Image: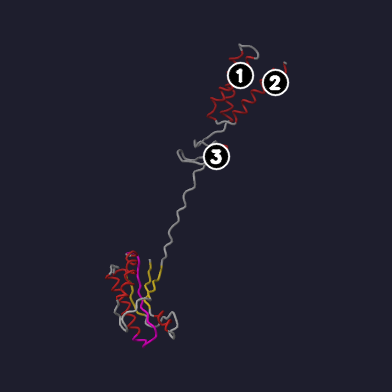
Amino acid sequence: MSIVRTALPLVLLTSVLTGCAGLQKTDWPTCAAVGGVVGAGLGATESSAWAGYGALLVGGTAAAYCWVHGDGDEDGDGVPDSRDKCPGTPKGVHVDANGCPPPAPVVEEAVVVKEETIVIRDVHFQFDKATLTSSDKQVLDKIATRLKAEAPTAQLTVTGHTDSVGSDAYNQKLSDKRAHSVVEYLIEQGVPRSSFVSVVGAGESQPVADNKTADGRAQNRRTEIKIQR
């Protein structure tokens, strides 16, 4: 019986201290209270006079042990230091179960195409002239709407092209007149004149298809608008 009376206090005290070690430092009042109850019980096993001393001794020991060995929360984020993977989190920052702030949202930057070329093949002009037809203007109206959205930051370069029918000199002049006709119409529709940095005719010098076929010649008859942002 004396062995049990001697061992029981040690077992109970060890249990209290072990339990306190799993708490946070701020839980020392709980450890003190539990220790006090256990200490009072241990003291009472000797005599009623020892109950108060036992409560004071074990309660104080448990509180001190909890403060020294307890799991702290130094950054005050609500996550114990033992599993806080992001110590030192600023006060007031929302954290997850690991004590870490949520990752910042990934903002994807819009990719701006620095250079783009609009190829117009649906503008046919009047035969052997640089005069726009009604259907030509309908096509250019859509392009004007887009180019106005690009202004005033974009720089526009317009180049007229022809097929190989006729002399080089004639095609050169015709392509130049047609390029200017396109530009003047776009300006009338609200595209700033200052946006156009170059308006030239390349004649038949820059074919993109075989001039020996009707389809190839149709592809070569075009107006190109290069957009530089």
Q: Amino acid at mark 3?
A: Asp
In this rendering, the answer to whether 24 lies above or below 138 is above
- Density class for disc 3 (Cα within 10 Å; few <14, some 14-19, many ≥20) is many
Q: Which residue is mark 2?
A: 7
Secondary structure of residue under mark 2: helix
Q: How is the image coloured?
A: secondary structure
Snapshot quadrant of residue 6: top right
Snapshot quadrant of residue 22: top right
Q: Position of residue 56 (x, y in %)?
A: 57, 18
Q: Which residue is mark 1?
A: 39
Give me the disc on residue 20.
none
Q: Position of residue 109 (x, y in %)?
A: 44, 57
Question: Would residue 222 appear left or right of 91 to someone viewing this image?
Answer: left
The reply to whether the magenta stretch includes residue 168 is: yes
Secondary structure of residue under mark 3: loop
**Mark 3 and mark 1 in contact (Cβ < 8 Å)?**
no
Question: Would residue 4 appear left or right of 188 to someone viewing this image?
Answer: right
Secondary structure of residue under mark 1: helix
Q: Quadrant of the C terminus?
A: bottom left
Q: Residue at x 38, y 78 (%)?
A: 222
Q: Earlier in the sequence, mark 2 or mark 3?
A: 2
Marks 2 and 3, how far apart in space? 38 Å
Q: Quadrant of the N terminus?
A: top right
Magenta stretch, residue numbers: 152-170
Q: Which residue is mark 3?
A: 84
Marks 1 and 3, how far apart in space? 34 Å
Q: Which residue, as the protein is rendered here, is positioned at the far front?
A: 135
